Amino acid sequence: MSRKITIAGLDIGSNKITGVVATKDLDTNTLKMEHVAVSDCKGLKGGVVIDIQQTSDSIQQVLHELEDSVKKELDNIYIAIRGYHLESFTNHGAYNISRVDKEITADDIYFAIENAKSVPVKNDNDIINTIPQNFSVDKQQGIPNPEGMEGSLLEVDLHVTTGSSTHLNNLLRAIERIGYKVDVTLYGLIALGDCALTQEEKDLGALIIDIGGDTMSVGLYFDGGLRFSRDIPYGADLITRDIAYGVRTSRTNAKNLKEEYAVAHPSYLGDEEEIKVEDLDGKTTNSIKKTFLLDVVQPRVEELFTEVKRALDRSGYSEVPAIGVLTGGGSVMPGMKEMCSEVLGLKEVRSGSVQRDLMISDETFFAPEYSTAVSLVVYESERNHYGDYSRVGVQTSGSVLGKVSKMFKKMDFFGG
């Protein structure tokens, strides 16, 4: 009988919850996607809990649907978070090996990473994730796994993500109160970039942009690792708002117009046509042209990508990206790739989803709006390969650091 485990992940989005459940066969090392569930959530704004009861209700709805699909209870889950309160940066750490044999051990790697984590953190902020980018031994850079090598000085570059402990704990409370336990909290962009980008793209320089409703998550990869990431507090819901205001219709109608007729670039206009739009009073209708809708949408899309450019310029890496990758529900509008290319000066922009060879699934799971939830499950299913310190979800005793230290001791960081 094959050994199988069930893995469930929740993408805590800007204003919705997306859940995915998968089965991993430990004997064949294959991951099969089983079901995806989505619930709008008025208790979230920009990935931050503003109503804990409504958030709990939405999460419970998603988890119950996932449980029904696999006919079993989900005890432990992983969550992917986003939000403007998140901050990321890269820090350098080093550790001197003074033993006579000079052989680098897992403990030495641990202490080098711990030294890199010794950075000032804002009040009310926690370290959520720390991802080793690369190691060097006696100044020799580009070493993916230094364990077993000989050297006197071990150095590491560590990508650190911090976030508001208040916002994080409110989210954990929303989940805990409906009887579930969070195993790991992960900045969603980390899993997304790891699973949606090819290794060649990570090496050459790739900018990944996850466009949500209230936020955009931006990550820059080069030399094989994540070098810069930022959450921007603007998203595709601004486009919906502009349509509602410009056309004088309800938000619901504006959302339908955006999804059915709107394009972000004039090359996608096609044949001109009249679009019937219901007025705010719900009794009368007006007609608009697709060109009018483009005039409303295009400036906002340009502004969104301009915000990405500003963040990239401030990072000091504006000349690095060779390719852009768009994902998330806000990226599916025709013309988004062209606008991204024009505003950011990228020669190539593609749509992004989880790489197909990482899982067994039907076409549903490759939809951009499910990318973060799916990548979270894929990432955590191969977690021991990555060597990521993640924020422990629910604390029952002891410190976060103590629990993470024990976790590190048990895991094979490099999948060797």
Image (tube, rainbow, N blue to C red):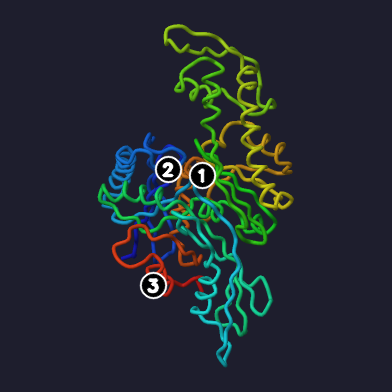
Q: Earlier in the sequence, mark 3 or mark 2?
A: 2
CB atoms of marks 1 and 2 within 8 Å: yes
Q: Percent position (x, y) of residue 162?
A: 49, 55
Q: Earlier in the sequence, mark 1 or mark 2?
A: 2
Residue 355 appearing in the image: no
Residue annotated with mark 3: 406
Residue type at tag 1: Tyr
Q: Nearer the viewer, mark 3 or mark 1?
A: 1
Q: In the structure shown, which secondary structural element does the residue marked by tag 1 occupy?
A: loop
Spatial CA distance of label 3 from label 2 is 30 Å
Residue annotated with mark 2: 48
Q: Which mark is residue 84?
A: 1
Residue 266 appearing in the image: yes
Residue type at tag 2: Val
Spatial CA distance of label 3 from label 1 is 31 Å
Using residue 292 as the reference point, say whether residue 391 is left or right of it. left
Mark 3, Cα crowd under 10 Å, few <14 / some 14-19 / many 20+, is few
Using residue 83 as the reference point, say whether residue 23 is left or right of it. left
Mark 2, Cα crowd under 10 Å, few <14 / some 14-19 / many 20+, is many
